[in-house]
Amino acid sequence: MEITIKEQTYKVKYSIRSLFIFEQIKGKTFTLESLLDQYIFFYSMILANNPECTLTFDQFIDECDEDFTLVTSLQKYITEVFAKQAQLNKADEGDSKKK
């Protein structure tokens, strides 16, 4: 997925690197318990997939305030990723029960 913030295009992807960055920023294990966690995770996905990124968290939040479609597209993307993971987990559980 790609998003554009202030005429700059950023690649956004759920990855292990984005989870690491989230944990570094928060200082805790990855969980999305609050709205703040969600926004930090969105920002972490940007940082993880754009090594040259100079966008600060405050700039990211300002852009989210100005353009709510940015937030909804990120929420939709992560919901789809988590749904796919859930389906894979169910398939894995089914395979385990067959053995």
Image: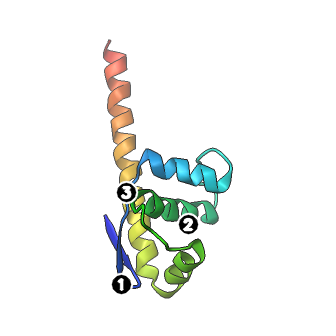
The answer to which of 62 and 69 lies nearer the viewer is: 62
Q: Amino acid at mark 2?
A: Tyr
Lower sequence index among marks 3 and 1: 1
Identity of the residue drawn at 37% across and 57% down: 13
Q: Amino acid at mark 3?
A: Lys
Classify the position of the N terminus by image quarter.
bottom left
Identity of the residue drawn at 35% across and 84% down: 7
Identity of the residue drawn at 60% across and 77% down: 58
Name which quarter of the figure residue 97 lies in: top left
Residue 4: percent from left, percent from top: 36, 78
Is mark 1 in CB contact (under 8 Å) with mark 2? no
Q: Which mark is residue 39?
A: 2
Name which quarter of the figure residue 32 lies in: bottom right
Q: Which residue is mark 3?
A: 13
The answer to which of 37 and 87 lies nearer the viewer is: 37
Q: Which residue is mark 1?
A: 7
Tag in front: 1 or 2: 1
Q: Work out how far the residue at label 1 is from the one at label 2, CA to CA, in angstroms.
A: 20 Å
| Label 3: which secondary element | loop
